[in-house]
Amino acid sequence: MHLCKLKKHKYAIGLLDKGAVPDGECFSLLFESCASLKSLKHSKKVHDHFLQSKFRGDPKLNKMVIGMYGECNSVTDAKRVFDHMVDKDVDSWHLMMRVYSDNGMGDDALSLFEEMMKQGLKPNDETFLNVFLACANVGGIKEAFLHFDSMRNEYGITPRTEHYLGLLDVLGKCGYLVESEQYIHELPFEPSADFWEAMRSYAKLHGDINLEDFAEELSMIELDPSSKAVIKKVPTPPPNSLKETSMIANKNRILEFRNPSFYKDKAKEMAIKKGPVYVPETRWVMHDIDEEAKGEALLHHGERLAIAYGLMNTPARKSLTIIKNIRVCGDCHNFIKIMSKMVGRELIVRDNKRFHHFKDGKCSCGDYW
């Protein structure tokens, strides 16, 4: 427990092999540690010890195991634990739905919701937040609004701000920007800055610069109504901004790949040789530079370098997992889809929002993230 609290997770897990017998609180810390590490290997080791303990039937700890496997992008293991739970409360169903949605399996999350209804469990306000998340995952706009109506009319649940944001998320992620803006204006209450911040994100995602600026200005006004300042777009990030980092595990080492300037010449060579399949989407480059420079900037994003290294240093057909500290951009998303088909491998990218499972030219998120 002391090692877990010091965040020395691997040392704590290593004590299990030396005969340490954790109690319930210690298992809780170990599950949190494995989820933080996002290591399936360590998660399975801790889970094996848990199954041999007297705490194996503890509902709270089993829910933590499901969450741990979800963080390690192992939906199969999470579902196996869920299926073996004897007493599943509503929170257990919510957690499994969330694991599905976070891994781009919105259809499975909605199927689980239907199964939950058949079991006779009564949904609550949290249930519908997970339903909206799943709908946003699969582009289920009509389905989301039907569930919103049933929430109020069938189950008597008064929608909270989060539910209205959930519906906005469905519209925005699916690219219905005009409808999203109209939806905000027709809300039964004054929209907060959260709504315009979300609108700004969707406009940025789908390349509507004018709407992005408009939403940003309204967001700032909502945050500070007394502010009369003119909102100015900063063309380049400040000197101390967070650097993009992508990581890949290789032979017990974690290698980092950043945006390096010394790849510039190589990027030019690649740009000259690139075929008609991949065309850089330069709208994802926020810097105030010319189009050629934007194309070059996209070619050496960290996740691409990490994937290239992984392909060169792992056996054929082995899946790769890349961990990013920022959101994957739309251009890299398209690039990795193409790459997964070319190399015939599953490429898993975990950014700061979710897991993306790329396989055969498609992504598990269905291009809604």
Image (spheres, helix red, strand yellow):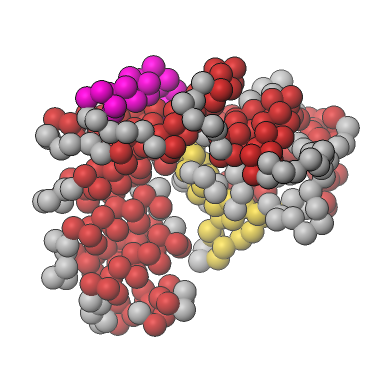
Q: Which residue reaches farthest front?
A: 226
* Residue 344 sits above or below residue 48 on the image: above
Image quadrant in which you'd find residue 230: top right
| Residue 353 in view, yes or no | yes
Question: Is 170 included in the stretch rendered in magenta?
Answer: no
In the rendered image, residue 242, in percent from the top left (x then y), is placed at 70, 56
Q: Is residue 359 left or right of residue 91?
A: right
In the rendered image, residue 121, in percent from the top left (x then y), is placed at 15, 37
| Residue 76 in view, yes or no | no
* Residue 85 sits above or below residue 240 on the image: above
Nearer to the camera, 276 or 127: 127
Tell me which residue sits at (34%, 25%) in the image: 148
Total numbered labels placed on residues in the image: 0
Q: Is residue 24 left or right of residue 329?
A: left
Majority SS type along the magenta span: helix
Q: Quadrant of the N terminus?
A: bottom left
* Residue 206 sits above or below residue 194 on the image: above
Q: Is residue 40 left or right of residue 338?
A: left
Nearer to the camera, 278 or 272: 278
Q: Which residue reaches farthest right?
A: 290
Question: Is 139 included in the stretch rendered in magenta?
Answer: yes
Image quadrant in which you'd find residue 235: top right
Nearer to the camera, 287 or 279: 287
Nearer to the camera, 80 or 194: 194
Tell me which residue sits at (59%, 17%) in the image: 178
The stretch in magenta equals 136-154
In the rendered image, residue 188, in percent from the top left (x then y), is placed at 46, 26
* Residue 190 sits above or below residue 302 on the image: above
Tell me which residue sits at (48%, 44%) in the image: 354
Q: Is residue 262 left or right of residue 37?
A: right
In the rendered image, residue 245, in percent from the top left (x then y), is placed at 65, 54
